[in-house]
Image (cartoon, grey):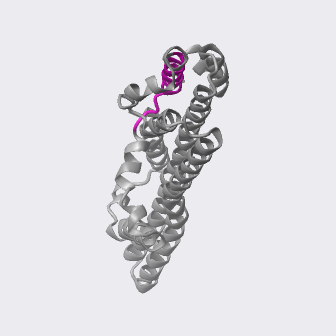
Amino acid sequence: MELTTILGIVVGILAVVGAMIFKHISFAVFINPAALTVIFVGTIACVLNAFTGNEIKNIGKLFKILFTKYDMSKKNNLIEIICDFAQAARKEGLLALESKVEGLEDDFLKRGVRMVVDSASEDYIRDVLSIEMEQIRERHGMNASIFTQAGVYAPTLGVLGAVFGLIAAMANINDAMAMSEAIAAAFMATILGIFTGYVLWSPFANKLKIKDKHEMVEKKIILEGVLSILNGDHPDMIKDKLRSFLTAKEKAGIPE
């Protein structure tokens, strides 16, 4: 579980609630169907208009990624697997890796090792895996842009909700109580728009980009590791080379 995501949401809500308490604002203002509709339904409408169904259908998986903690030991585990494969290749030859390929969980690594077993050239392997990495990066960028765009639309929709509220207020200009309620509702829409845009959607997009960077480092480790196996490098040399991709904490095995 990615606690920072949960903590960020909770702290953001507490910040708004705390401000309301300090300003003696009634929580009844949250019971505002018009504001909720224009912000949440409006944001959904904007996203639907901005992206195709193929991109939007993955939204559930994206939320799962946001709330799933990244395993910081994964890079070290990949290095150990690659070094074990390198050791086997030096002792028994590259064909000995064929029986080990099916046991791999990482499809990217599996594809790379398979090309090594098939005696593909270094340039070919690098080209194929690099193209796949670029496609993954573009797909991840598209996924993050869904939240980026939602973060742009929501505050603007808050302004739209405020306009609706002010129109309602002007329609009740002779009724002071109704007019004040309409103005309060107007500003509630603005608050919801800014909160969801700048506390939820835009930060979510940034977190997806960070997770993408971690995955790209994994892919680089695999790419360089596979090529090192192909070249017959010593496992110790491969380990030293691949550990250069790790942070100081990752090298020390300290959870971040």
What percent of the width, then of the height, locates residue 161? 46, 72
What percent of the width, then of the height, locates residue 94? 51, 25
State the quadrant of the C terminus.
Answer: top right
What percent of the width, then of the height, locates residue 163? 49, 77
* Residue at 48% over, 35% down: 109
* Residue at 32% over, 61% down: 31
> In this orientation, which residue lies closer to the viewer: 2 or 195?
2
Q: Quadrant of residue 225?
A: top right
What percent of the width, then of the height, locates residue 160? 49, 75
> In this orientation, which residue lies closer to the viewer: 69 or 89?
89
State the quadrant of the N terminus.
Answer: top left
Locate residue 63 relative to residue 83 in the image: left or right: left
Q: Quadrant of residue 58?
A: bottom left
> In this orientation, which residue lies closer to the viewer: 161 or 100?
100
Asked if 216 appears above or below 82 in the picture, the reply is: below
Q: For residue 75: magenta?
A: yes
Q: Main secondary structure of the magenta part?
A: helix
Q: For residue 177: magenta?
A: no
Q: How many marks?
A: 0
* Residue at 44% over, 63% down: 188
Locate residue 245 relative to residue 182 in the image: left or right: right
The magenta stretch is 68-87
Asked if 145 appears above or below 64 in the picture, the reply is: below
> In this orientation, which residue lies closer to the viewer: 72 or 22?
72
